[in-house]
Structure formats: C-alpha cells, structure tokens
Image: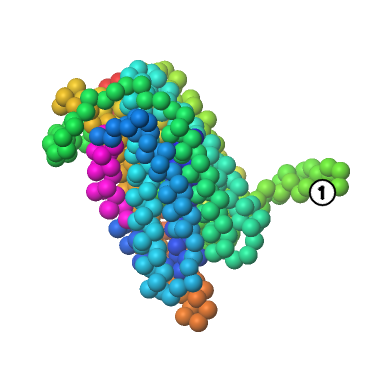
Amino acid sequence: MGDAAAGGITWKIMSIAFPVFFTNVFGLSFADAAILMLIARLFDVVTDPLMGSLADRTQSKWGTYRPWLIFGAIPYGLIFALLLFTPDLGPVGKRIYAYTFYLLMMAAYTAVNVPYGSLLGVMTDDDNEKNQFSSYRMVGAYLMGFITLLIFPYVQKWIGGTEAHQYAVIGAVFGGLAALMTMLCGLMTKERIKPKRAEKYDFKQFVDLFKNKPWLYLTATGIFTNFFNGFRYAVAAYLFTYCLGGDVLLTGLSEWIGTIHIGNWNIDPTIIINFTVFMAIGEVTCMIFGGISPAFTKWVGSKRKAFIIAAFICVVTSVMFFFIPMDSAYMWLMILVVILTSMGIGIYSPLLWSMYADVADYATETFGTSSTGLIFSSGTMAQKLGGAISGSLIAALLGWAGLVSSQDMLTGETIVTITNESAVQTMIWCLFSLIPAGIALIMAWLVYRFPIKK
C-alpha cells in the first residue's frame, strides 16, 4: 500500500498529468512551468537529506520511521488535492498559488516517502528478503499505477464539466485514497531491526556520504533512471495531442465481433487509447516483470548484471520507437515497443531500491553508525530531481521548438498555439525515444562501475 499510494497514485499523476495540467489547464506558460518544476526539485536536494537525517533520529512508541507515515498521511493527501485545484486568479496569483503548493507538495512527499523507503532497512537484514520486499514495492506501485492511468480518462468523463473541475475532483479523490493507504502502511508494518544511532546531530554523516563511492554511483544511477521515466511519462500527453491527433480508436475488435449484447446493454468493443491508457499498458508490464525481477537476478547471478541487461533492453527498444512512423495506424506496433521497454523497467526498478539497502549496510560497516534514512532519502531525492529536470526540460524544449501557452486576459482560458508544427512533433518523438535511449545507456555504464557486487 505504501508504494501504491506514493508511486502508483501521487507520483504517477505528478509525472504524467502535471506538465500538461499546468500548461494546458491551469494556465501557466511553458517557461513558468519549466521554472516551477526545476526550482521545486532543487529545493528537494536540500530537504530530502535533512529529512533522512531527521528520520534516523526519531524515537517514538511507533518506531523510527513509521510515525512519519501515520501522522504525515493526511497533510500529504490534502496538499495533493489543493495542488490540482485551479483558483480563479489572475496570471500573477496563479503563479504564486502554483509555486506555493508545488513546494508544499514536495515537502509533504519528502516527509512521508523518505521514512517509507527507509523501512526496508529496518524490517530485515536478509539480502534475499530485501530483494523480495523491494519487488513487492514495485508490484504495488505498478499495479496501482496501471489502475490510476487506465481509469483516469474514464473518471474525467464521469466527472464532466470543465477540465479544471475534473482535475480538482480527481485531486480530492486520489489525494484521499493516497492518504488512507499511506496511513495504513504505517499502522500495519513493523520495524524489527534497531538502527545504531548517531544521536548527536552533526554534518559528519553528510561528509561521509561523499566518501561513500557506492552511494555516489547509485545516486547518479537513480537520477538517470528517473530521467528515463520522467521524459517518457511527461511527454506522453503531448505525443498523443500533437503527433497522433488525439485519442486513437482501435476498431479491429469491433469489426470482427460486432456490438456485444448483454441483456439491455449494447457494448461497443472499440478500444480507446489515450496517453494514460497507453502508459498504463507499460505499467502492467512493469508490474509483472517487477515480480519476476528477484528470480531473474538470481538466474543471472547478480543485481549488477540484471540491471545492465534491463538497461540495454531499454536502449534498444527506445531506439526502435523512433523509427515507427508518426501515424496512429501503427498504434499496435507502438504498444508492442512500449511493452518491451517496460520489461526492462520492471526488472531494474526493484533492484535500485535493494541496492540502496546494500549501500546503507556498507555505510554502517564503514563509518560506524546507521544512516539508513539519509541513504534512502537520496533515492527519493534522485526520483524527484530526475522527474523535475526532465519535466522542466520538456516544457523548455517544447517552448523552444514552437509550442506556446498563454492566457486569455478576458476569459481566463488557456490558449496553446504552435509556431512550427514539424519541429514540435520531431522534438516530442525524440523526447519519447532517442533521448531516453541515451539516458538508459548512461544507466548501464554507471551500474557497471557500481562497486558492490551482490
């Protein structure tokens, strides 16, 4: 439930819907959206390690890390809901609102998710169990991510009204669900290992981090894995809107079997593929291969080898996507390539968090005190930094290519115009294919250099 809430609901919506929400619904310019996401994540570079250090020193009857989930859940869900609300304000007021609540959301996410990730280090000291627990995390994240993305357009349609109203209701519903699941995760888990504490707060642990070679390589890897995911998820909505002409209807099934009649119900089996459904197909593939990841790792002999193989799968399939014609007639081929790419993502995602647990153990052995929360906070920091920079770059690059967002001063409506359609389409296609391929290649090299060979 913990990663279903964080990875499957809030982070998934923030990754796939926030860029297009801020520019096409909320009314920020592409430049404003780029700066907003970049500043917020640079803010996280400071807050995430501080939160990890603070969590390491927490002592309560609920444990070291669990109380942050239990008591942070409600503010976490509430702020998420407010962030998806579009206030009736002018351009300056909207900008202030967006910056305020985006920064608050990043702080709330940090306060919950850093301790949540750190639980892996105090629930077991068995390496195989860490791999399994990490796999459970990813299955939860991808299963809930699949559900979230699959139902997203149908929930919008059911809510009705303006897009701003739809996003506001979605924020309230999904924010409440994420809060409930986070709280239950905190209440229903158990910390079994008591960390060796550094009770006095000092900066030595931060200095020790930069002496920790495995941490340096893994943090860089974490940033690039989130670059890879961030580019693909954030650009998916633009890909459908500006390259494929909107939602794609796959009518092959309806032509073959016709309308399905069940009692008084007439069901048209035409499949509607929009950007959330498109990525949801990848989510369910990631879930399946996230579950397979521990067995695959054992079969190839090490986490390092398994990660490198998975990264190369992502390199090859991302390059393949670039050569698919930019035409909705090739949707089945696009779906197939997304499934193949998601196989690689599903294998390496659990390995990353299991490797953070290895780095935390290495740090304790090398420097004498536990810094589990601090180590895992770097994973969360990498996640948010990678997502932020990718989202910021997408907004900046699309604006540079010729996509312009502005607000009608009379009606307050968001107006998006294209000054160079060909350049915008080519940029979007590259952001989904060639650029992620280059990033996956860097991931493979970083893990090849990773010193801990388990």
Residue extending farthest right: 263
* Part of the protein shown in magenta: 40-56
- The front one of 294 and 11 is 11
- Quadrant that contains the C terminus: top left
The amino acid beneath tag 1 is Asn
Is 149 situated left or right of 266 in this image?
Answer: left
Residue 162, quarter of the rendered image: bottom right
**46 magenta-colored:** yes
Res 244 seen here: no
**211 magenta-colored:** no
Which residue is disc 1 drawn over? Answer: 266
x and y percentages locating residue 199 in the rendered image = 19, 32
x and y percentages locating residue 366 in the rendered image = 16, 24
Is 366 situated left or right of 279 in this image?
Answer: left
Q: Is residue 5 above or below residue 392?
A: above
Res 26 seen here: yes
